[in-house]
Image (cartoon, rainbow, N blue to C red):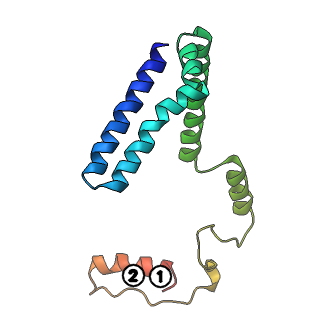
Amino acid sequence: MIAETVCSAVSAAGLGIAIVTAYRKRYLAAVRVAAYSLVPIGLVMTGVVEWLADTAFSPTAWAGFGVLGLAWVLFMTTRAVERRRGGTRKERRAAARAADRPGTVAPAASAPSLAQGSRPATKPAQASRDDDFSDIEAILKKHGI
């Protein structure tokens, strides 16, 4: 009974604010405030407020919310562990099968990797080059550039 009275008062106050907002010629905002202010009275009329009041004082309902919270925590924990391991079980099995086959391409690769024997012969690095450029050159050679 008290919840219905409070919701009615909130709706009346919201409609009053909507009228003042419309008086200031902000009609779009006034309509939006009126829409928000009608929600509490609509919830009272549909019986949702009474159901919520009964649920709020029910130990069984709170135990149910606790079980739902525990389920959510367990679900999120398993998702976090799954992401740290590198994907779902199905993806890990597919990657293991792909690694067993010779000549396969990595999932994110854009082109097949060159086999060890098919690489073109390269000249040895000259001694006059700096060590910084030799690292870059090794990376470029690794990618076939």
Task: Kindly report the distance in space between the C-alpha atoms of the residues bearing marks 2 and 1.
Answer: 6 Å
Quadrant in the rendering for residue 71? top right
Residue 144 is situated, as x and y percent measured from the top left of the image, at 52, 84
Give coordinates of residue 133: x percent, y percent: 31, 81
The answer to whether residue 66 is visible is: no
Callout 2: SS: helix
Amino acid, disc 1: Lys
Identity of the residue drawn at 46% across and 18% down = 3
- Numbered tag placed on residue 141 in the rendering: 1
Give the structural element (helix, strand or loop) at label 1.
helix
Q: Residue at x 60, y 28 (%)?
A: 46
Q: Using the rendered view, name the quadrant where residue 96 is placed.
A: bottom right
Q: Position of residue 75 (x, y in %)?
A: 60, 34
- Circles 2 and 1: CB distance less than 8 Å? yes
Q: Residues within 10 Å of mark 2 (few under 14, many from 20)?
A: some
Whether residue 102 is visible here, answered yes or no, is yes
Instruction: Answer above or below: position of 115 versus 5.
Output: below
Q: Point out the residue furthest to the left here.
A: 24
Q: Depth check: 49 or 104 in front?
A: 49
Label 1: how many Cα within 10 Å (few below 14, some 14–19, many 20+)? few
Tell which of 42 and 115 is nearer to you: 42
Q: Is residue 43 above or below residue 90?
A: above
Which residue is under mark 2?
A: 137
